[in-house]
Every structure is written in structure tokens, then in C-alpha cells.
Image (cartoon, rainbow, N blue to C red):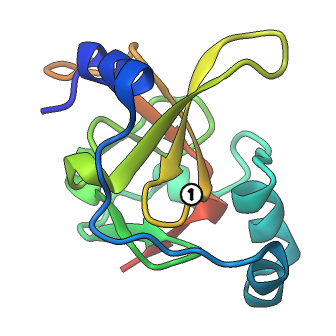
Amino acid sequence: MITWKKIKNFIAYGSPTPKNKIIKTETEWKNLLSDEVFNITRRSGTEHAFSSEMCSKFEPGLYACACCDSLLFDASEKYDSQSGWPSFSQPLEENSIGYKTDSSNLMVRVEVTCNSCDAHLGHVFPDGPEPSGLRYCINSLSLKRK
């Protein structure tokens, strides 16, 4: 199980090694993705809170990266955080997600990315449900249901 302490170690010593690495140019990503998905995933954008039905849907299944189709989250770890974005307490696998410090917007947070293609997904916070205590706050446009 990933904990906040483990995430702090990832920040200090590097994210876990991904299963595979997908590298494309900005132009290649732009040609593959809609403008909205490109802005969120490749330019670290944020969708408006409560703008997606995904916040209130809890059907079984998996969620993959909207850019590269790598599996990221299981719906069994999804919960209603009332934050306005889909929230998960754990990733599907430890090496599915990359972690880095985000000092933008006059605050310090932990950005989470697809560990395969480096797509911006959102942020993780230590205010989620037990037992992990984590809240992966994810832009719905960065995900695809599988």
C-alpha cells in the first residue's frame, strides 16, 4: 500500500520505475489529443471543479491514461471526496504513477503523472480515507474508463 511517507520518499529519491516509457514530441501529442485533453495532460491544466459526471459515477472497472492507455486506477479505490474531481485512495499499481513537487500557484503540492508518458493527472494529498489516508485528486479528462 502506498502511504504519504512512501510518496515523500518518491519525491526525494525518484518515482518508481514504470513498466514502459512512452515518448512523443509535443506535436505528436497535439495531433493525437483533443485541445482540452492536451491542455490538461501536456500543459498541466486543471478542469473546472464539478465539471465531470465522473465525480459521481462508481461503476466497477479500470481507469487508463487518456494519452497512452496505461492502466492507472481501479474503480474499487474511487470515492466521493466532494472536492469536485474524481478521487482515488490508491493507484492500480505502485509504478503506475509518477510523483513530483509542484510549487505553482503560490503553494506546494505533489503532482501526479502517468508514469509511462508523463501526462499530468492531478495531485495527491494526505487527507483521504484510511487505511492509506491518500486522496489522488485527478482531472477526469486525463482518464479513460476501460
- Which residue sits at x=20%, y=30%? 2
- 94 relative to 72 in the view: left or right: left
Q: Quadrant of the N terminus?
A: top left
**Secondary element at image label 1:** loop
Please state which of residues 130 and 20 is positioned toward the viewer in this rendering: 20
Q: Residue furthest front?
A: 13
Whole-percent x, y for residue 7 in the image: 34, 24
Whole-percent x, y for residue 63 in the image: 38, 67
- Which residue sits at x=20%, y=53%? 93
Q: Quadrant of the C terminus?
A: bottom left
Q: Is residue 134 visible?
A: no
The amino acid at mark 1 is Asp
Q: Is residue 123 above or below residue 13?
A: below
Please state which of residues 21 and 66 is positioned toward the viewer in this rendering: 21
Query: Few, some or many C-alpha atoms within 10 Å of disc 1 (few <14, some 14-19, many ≥20)?
Result: many
Q: Residue furthest bottom?
A: 31
Total marks drawn?
1
Please state which of residues 107 and 128 is positioned toward the viewer in this rendering: 107
Q: Is residue 46 above or below residue 66?
A: above
- Which residue sits at x=53%, y=29%? 82
Report which quarter residue 37 is drawn in. Answer: bottom right
Whole-percent x, y for residue 90 in the image: 26, 40
Q: Is residue 74 visible?
A: yes
Please state which of residues 126 and 52 is positioned toward the viewer in this rendering: 126
Whole-percent x, y for residue 55 in the image: 52, 49
Report which quarter residue 13 is drawn in. Answer: top left
Circle 1 is placed at which residue position?
A: 118
- 38 relative to 1 in the view: left or right: right
